[in-house]
């Protein structure tokens, strides 16, 4: 997968995020807009992560396999 579609998606999300932040600064952002900002933040994180994986390994799958949560052993406290 090429970087271009990922970068295009990031650009579109950033543009939308800026519009929503501008509305928020004017006091014109409703609850739905705030929820959308949260969703954009998560989607941007996923896009940037995918782009980093893509650049590190161009043959990596578009969606990573599900990682299993690791249990952290308790620290030895005297």
Image (cartoon, helix red, strand yellow):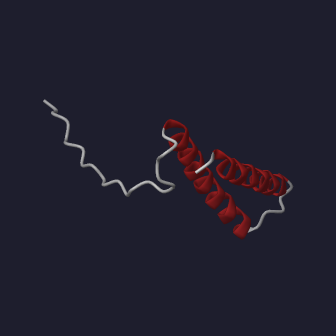
Q: Is residue 66 above or below residue 55?
A: below
Total numbered labels placed on residues in the image: 0
Q: Name the residue rendered at 35%, 53% in the picture.
A: 67
List the single residue furthest toward the bottom.
32
Which residue sits furthest top?
78
Residue drawn at (48%, 57%) of the image: 63
Image quadrant where residue 35 sits: bottom right
Residue 24: quarter of image: bottom right
Residue at the spot x=50%, y=42% of the render? 53
- Which residue appears farthest toward the left when viewing the image? 78
Q: Quadrant of the C terminus?
A: top left
* Above or below for 12 versus 77: below
The answer to whether residue 24 is left or right of residue 53 is right
Residue 28 location (% of width, % of height): 84, 62
Q: Where in the figure is residue 74, as x and y percent of width and height?
A: 19, 41
Q: Please state which of residues 78 and 15 is positioned toward the viewer in this rendering.
A: 15
Q: Answer left or right for 68 relative to 5.
A: left
Q: Residue furthest right?
A: 26
Residue nearer the viewer, 65 or 69: 65
* Vertical position of residue 40 compared to residue 49: above or below: below
Q: Is residue 77 left or right of residue 54?
A: left
List x then y, in percent, for residue 50: 54, 48
Residue at 79 percent of width and 63 percent of height: 29
């Amino acid at each position: 997968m090429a970087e271009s579609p990922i970068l295009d998606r990031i650009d579109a999300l950033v543009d939308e995020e800026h519009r929503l932040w501008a509305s928020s600064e004017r006091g014109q952002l409703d609850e739905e807009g705030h929820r959308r900002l949260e969703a954009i933040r998560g989607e941007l994180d996923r896009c940037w992560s995918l782009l980093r994986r893509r650049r590190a390994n161009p043959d990596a799958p578009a969606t990573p396999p599900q990682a299993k949560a690791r249990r952290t052993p308790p620290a030895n406290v005297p």
